[in-house]
């Protein structure tokens, strides 16, 4: 499934997004759009064949460019890492459940608000790290905090770090750290 996700800043400084894809199972072309960080609106039109979907996707991209939208290259985006402290160094079955639940919750929350996407998750020493990629780091941090509360993830164990996409080694804590504590992966 091909998806095109585009962004633009309005004259008021609001970051807007629009994305489109063909849902092969239902035979429809889906357009999802709105202000980044807010619940989006979705429209569907019939697209019975892959060719019809490809044609609609090309039109969507051309129309988006004409309206000032663009695909933001990874180099201009940010790593936003949600980190949950674990009770053991390697994690337990309960922590693997947390990983699935957090991944699914963040993926869904981000997708319907244009915030970004979950790239991967991994267990570190005593930590679960969920790596997301986002064009607006502040919106992603706020989104992770809201998502964690709404999904009953343990926010007392949550820390969030941010780094430019090309410099993950420069990650800085943005939430959940004690004064003087640094964010480490």
Image (tube, helix red, strand yellow):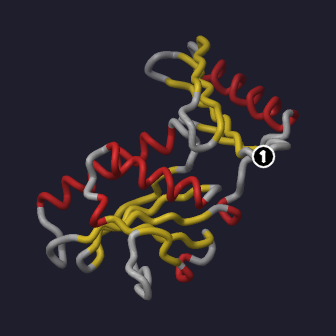
Percent position of residue 3, x then y: 60, 38
Residue 47 drawn above or below residue 138 = above
- Most foreground residue, 40 or 19: 40
Q: Quadrant of residue 89?
A: bottom left
Residue 135 drawn above or below residue 70 = below
Percent position of residue 44, x then y: 58, 16
Report the label total.
1
Query: Is residue 12 rendered to the left or right of residue 15?
Result: right
Residue sitting at the far front = 179
Percent position of residue 19, x then y: 64, 35
Q: Which residue does the image show at 30% across and 44% down from the upper left?
A: 151
Q: Which residue does the image show at 44% across and 42% down from the upper left?
A: 109
Percent position of residue 91, x then y: 17, 69
Residue carrying label 1: 9
Q: Which residue does the image show at 53% across and 70% down from the upper left?
A: 162
- Most foreground residue, 1 or 74: 74
Query: Is residue 178 rendered to the left or right of residue 167?
Result: left
Q: Which residue does the image show at 48% across and 71% down from the upper left?
A: 161
| Image quadrant in which the C terminus is located | bottom left
């Amino acid at each position: 499934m091909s998806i095109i996700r585009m962004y633009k800043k309005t004259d008021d400084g609001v970051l807007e997004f629009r994305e489109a894809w063909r849902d092969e199972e239902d035979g429809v072309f889906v357009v999802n759009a709105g202000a980044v960080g807010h619940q989006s609106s979705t429209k569907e039109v019939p697209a019975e064949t892959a060719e019809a979907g490809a044609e609609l996707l090309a039109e969507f991209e051309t129309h988006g460019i004409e309206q000032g939208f663009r695909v933001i290259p990874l180099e201009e985006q940010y790593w936003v890492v949600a980190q949950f402290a674990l009770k053991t160094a390697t994690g337990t079955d309960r922590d693997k459940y947390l990983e699935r639940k957090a991944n699914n919750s963040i993926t869904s929350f981000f997708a319907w608000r244009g915030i970004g996407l979950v790239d991967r998750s991994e267990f570190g020493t005593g930590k679960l790290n969920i790596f997301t990629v986002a064009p607006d780091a502040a919106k992603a941090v706020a989104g992770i905090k809201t998502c964690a509360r709404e999904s009953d993830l343990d926010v007392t164990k949550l820390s969030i770090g941010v780094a430019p996409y090309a410099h993950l080694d420069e990650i800085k804590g943005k939430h959940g750290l004690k004064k003087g504590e640094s964010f480490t992966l």
